[in-house]
Image (cartoon, coloured by chain):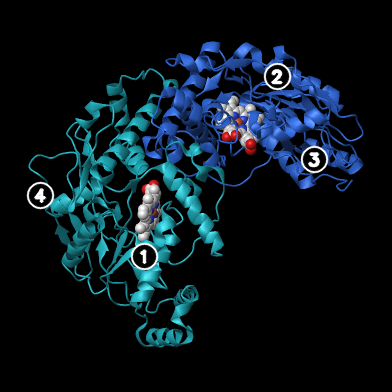
Chain colours: A blue, B cyan
Amino acid sequence: VENTQIDIAEAEDFVRQHHAEHPDLGPVEARLAEVHAEIAATGTYRHTTAELTFGARVAWRNSSRCIGRLYWRSLKVRDQREVSAPADVAAECVEHLRVATNKGKIRPVITIFAPAEPGMPAPQILNEQIVRYAAYRGTDGGVLGDARNLALTELALKRGWQPPATRGPFDVLPLMVSCEGHEPALVDIPADAVLEVPLSHPELPWLGALGVKWHAVPAISNMRLRIGGIDYPSAPFNGWYMGTEIGARNLADHDRYDLLPYIAKRMGLDMSSEATLWRDRALIELNRAVLHSFGEAGVTITDHHTESQRFLTHLEKEEAAGRSCPADWSWIVPPVSGGLTPVYHRYYDSGELLPNFFPAAKTGCPVVH
Amino acid sequence: VENTQIDIAEAEDFVRQHHAEHPDLGPVEARLAEVHAEIAATGTYRHTTAELTFGARVAWRNSSRCIGRLYWRSLKVRDQREVSAPADVAAECVEHLRVATNKGKIRPVITIFAPAEPGMPAPQILNEQIVRYAAYRGTDGGVLGDARNLALTELALKRGWQPPATRGPFDVLPLMVSCEGHEPALVDIPADAVLEVPLSHPELPWLGALGVKWHAVPAISNMRLRIGGIDYPSAPFNGWYMGTEIGARNLADHDRYDLLPYIAKRMGLDMSSEATLWRDRALIELNRAVLHSFGEAGVTITDHHTESQRFLTHLEKEEAAGRSCPADWSWIVPPVSGGLTPVYHRYYDSGELLPNFFPAAKTGCPVVH
Ligand code: HEM
Ligand code: HEM
């Protein structure tokens, strides 16, 4: 084990920030003394429930790639720090999904598992999101399913996952969780925990017959949450979808479901040249289908115009609170009609604030990379 | 006059680069000696024709916001360094427009006027582009024309410009050129020098009846060209349009012609909520109209899909030549369907290379700002 003691300055900054933003907590000195003593004795310290909640919410507030930050205070924090055994982590991920789904009225939720402590290995979720669709390479080289998950699917198969008898384009992958010193887990997600929305279109009936669907809850499960010097490598979190994530990326990207050429053909568009903008037209109809279908199904979703407006409101509020709000233009501006959204026509603060979420460490998972 | 001598190091870097990229020019030492002597004697130096041509082309190559750089070697350079009197500058801008228009087969052209020399004031073109449409504020507070040009229009009127008897949304503004020590010029651009394309749509006949049009040649006229330490404050340049510049910005931006609500209404779209994506649908049809109309009129234009592909080709070529190619993601990714273009899915070198184009200095024009 390399790091035997956490970064005291970072811990102190965080505790001070927590108190500064919550004057009701009283003077910070007593808590600082506690934290110092605990670090001196154990190399680390344990967040209070209030600190954990505040830290997770501020990590969201500081996520410079996230356009959905207006509601950062509403994040529901599930404290599962006692859980580190892979099978238990997987089971709690399923529970996370149920709590977040809430019959379609999606709730932003984070579940925080055991931290990385000196000498204590922490669990690591290998799935990028809790719900991911499998990808199978056919004998012709084509891919059935979400090509983004080819490696994850391969790993699941190697570890003994039994795919459905008839493989389909939307087979939910099992959760895979590792933790040094434990048996790795491979746990199927019960079908009734995964709310899915079948796609249909307000005017194009054939689109509803394609059998395309998407899951309701985007829950990123492989990012590391860092609060006050402490790493939580397993801390899946979710909001609700912005339609373009599904309609302009997951179902449209060339290396994902790549549906646009097919949709354009079915729409009868002139595909003889790029200048007919057939891609753009198919894209808009696919995105209409996504927003329409989630709406019909009563599943929370947002469109990129509304969400851009909300983000500007968030910026105003942060400014009024005297805080910098770093934002990454290339992630904030939506992939559809960027120029139409007000977030396009301005610059943002840059910089990286703490607490925050970080990409899974390359070394965190000895199997996948 | 503050700067009495130009930056020798920058001059030397440029001359070395010119020779390095043109081995046929032979050893650089003789030319360097000449340049040093000339700077010592006069405080500046005069570019050879070859240097001026190379410098302007490389300034384009280094324009990190420009997606159209694949053809940088084809830039036609018009050497008008002897011209500094405002009326003559204006007349040569008109001539630039004719050369560039080429009956619709647009040619990338730059016209380079007198440089800024120690003690010698250079001309400054006040118009942002050679062709700009006037904007008039109505008594109801509304704007007729291109709201972006309200200040420029006001200035023209103050200087005695006679707008058409019946003011319209597409009245071409006069060229305004200043130069210390000279009478400022206000010169109408002859109608036959301004090729314009009336907008029509392949399927929506009413769109063709709206009387919307745009000019064929985008010629930026207020950026400063800097080559080897020498500033050319007046060096208008043009390429051809990428359709989105007209269809997604000039005609669509809220603070420009703001046509989308009107087009959506005429299309009969459901505008009751953002989630119907009526803005996006109107946007695509407007952009189809632009590409269709320029095509029908035989005027060179490019679409954002094709141009994105070309830009990646350019990057490959630059890499193969061992050169860095700085690019500004937020300018390179088009404002329509960004996620569909390959330029979206990667990062770029940053940094600012010389020669290059720079925004008009705030102090360059004592009148407008
Ligand atoms: C409540 C509704 C939410 C919406 C509409 C929303 C929207 C988005 C969108 C559109 C992206 C870009 C995704 C992409 O292009 O791949 C994003 C990224 C991100 N969001 Fe949110 N978000 C929400 C909630 C949350 C929550 C609850 C958290 C954390 C607690 C969060 C943290 C992040 C982070 C860390 C990223 C960057 C992910 C990465 O680097 O791959 N968001 N969000
Ligand atoms: C040949 C066809 C060309 C195409 C299709 C093209 C395309 C574009 C586009 C789409 C932009 C962004 C404009 C905006 O969003 O306002 C741009 C910016 C720019 N281009 Fe090009 N371009 C071309 C030729 C040229 C030429 C000939 C030059 C100079 C010699 C040039 C220099 C620049 C510069 C300096 C900018 C940034 C302008 C600013 O900062 O406002 N381009 N170009």
Q: Rounded to the nearest whole Å, what is the CA distance between mark 3 and mark 4?
A: 71 Å
> How far is the residue under mark 2 from the one under mark 3?
23 Å
Q: Are marks 2 and 4 in contact (CB under 8 Å)?
A: no
Estimate how packed mark 3 is, as few (under 14), some (14 to 19) or many (20 or more) residues with alpha carbons within 10 Å: some
User: How far apart are the alpha carbons under marks 3 and 1?
Assistant: 50 Å
Between A45 and B230, which is closer to the camera in this rendering? Answer: B230
Disc 3: which residue: A364
Residue A51, how many percent across, how many down?
Answer: 74, 31
Indicate the secondary structure of the residue bearing disc 4: loop
Disc 1 crowd rating (10 Å Cα; few below 14, some 14-19, many 20+) is many
Residue B346 in view, yes or no: yes
The disc numbered 4 marks a residue on which chain?
B
> Do discs 3 and 1 belong to a common subunit?
no
- Secondary structure type for disc 3: loop
Give residue B14's position: percent from left, percent from top: 45, 74
Which labelled disc corresponds to residue A305? none
Instruction: Give the label on residue B225, or none.
Output: 1
- In the rendered view, would you say A175 is above or below B298? above
Which is more toward the observer, B181 or B176? B176
Asked which secondary structure carries label 1, the reply is strand
Quickly name the residue at label 4.
B162
The kind of residue tagged 1 is Leu
